[in-house]
Image (cartoon, rainbow, N blue to C red):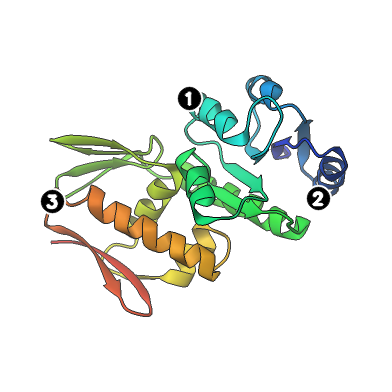
Amino acid sequence: MKKTRILYVEDEIFLAKIVSETLQGRGYEVVVENDGAKAFDQFVSKEPDVCVLDVMLPNKDGFEIADQIRSKDASVPIIFLSAKSQTPDVLNGFKAGGNDYIRKPFSIEELIVRIENVIKVKSRTNTENDDVQFGGYTFNSRRQTLVHPTENKKLSYRESELLRLLYINRENIVERTEILNTLWGSDSFFNSRNLDVYITKLRGYLKLDPSIEIITIKGIGYRFVVR
């Protein structure tokens, strides 16, 4: 069975050694790079299944690397690691194409859970049909596009995954805890506030068709409705 290959970009040599050895001990193949300027070349040559990127790196930061990666591959999962944990920093990570954002210091067990989670989400996405239609929209989760006759929208990975999760459970209530654990890896207060932001963004994207609604079920979750 092919091992999951992880590109791990980290300039703290001691931390990189500990994390990479632990991941290797859990059965992962790990490619370590310490220089941000060399990370994209490693991505192209090694073709990893998951990218774990420190944000603060010499020569090129993690957000810039993610932007390069996304120009070549829209679907490979990207996890950011950073001591910068303010909400704008986290949102910048998602805007840069990240699937997850872990604040330093972190436990290696948490990192492993997050890695396993993004792999599962990608696996589910790859088994589904590309295009789905609802109302006046055509949605492609693999390409992360939402197309309306009057507007084409390129979604971030997490926006796409949230819309996909709501759509496949349409007409049914999807609990907040399920969404948070599936897409963020935990239902912490911090992640919960991020979910609120993403729901608001999706509602804005879907406003061109009044027959589509994301209904809030207070204290429980959301229901995606197409009338």
Kind of residue at badge 2: Arg
Q: Position of residue 151 (x, y in %)?
A: 18, 36
Q: Residue at image x 53%, y 65%?
A: 190
**Distance between the Cα atoms at labels 1 and 2?**
30 Å
Badge 1 or badge 2: first in the primary sequence: 2
Quarter of the picture containing the C terminus is bottom left
Q: Secondary structure at mark 3?
A: loop
82 vs 47, nearest the viewer: 82
Can residue 42 be spotted in the picture?
no
Q: Relative to 207, does residue 24 appear above or below in the rendering?
A: above
Neighbours of disc 1 within 10 Å: few (<14), some (14-19), many (20+): few
Q: Residue at image x 73%, y 39%?
A: 3
Q: Secondary structure at mark 2?
A: loop
Would you name the residue on which mark 2 appears? 26
Kind of residue at badge 1: Ser
Q: Position of residue 181 (x, y in %)?
A: 53, 64
**Distance between the Cα atoms at labels 1 and 3?**
30 Å
The label on residue 182 is none
The label on residue 209 is 3
84 vs 219, nearest the viewer: 84
Would you name the residue on which mark 1 appears? 71
Badge 1 or badge 3: first in the primary sequence: 1
103 vs 187, nearest the viewer: 103
Left or right: where 138 falls relative to 75: left
Q: Position of residue 19 (x, y in %)?
A: 81, 47
Q: Residue at image x 49%, y 50%?
A: 88
Neighbours of disc 3 within 10 Å: few (<14), some (14-19), many (20+): some
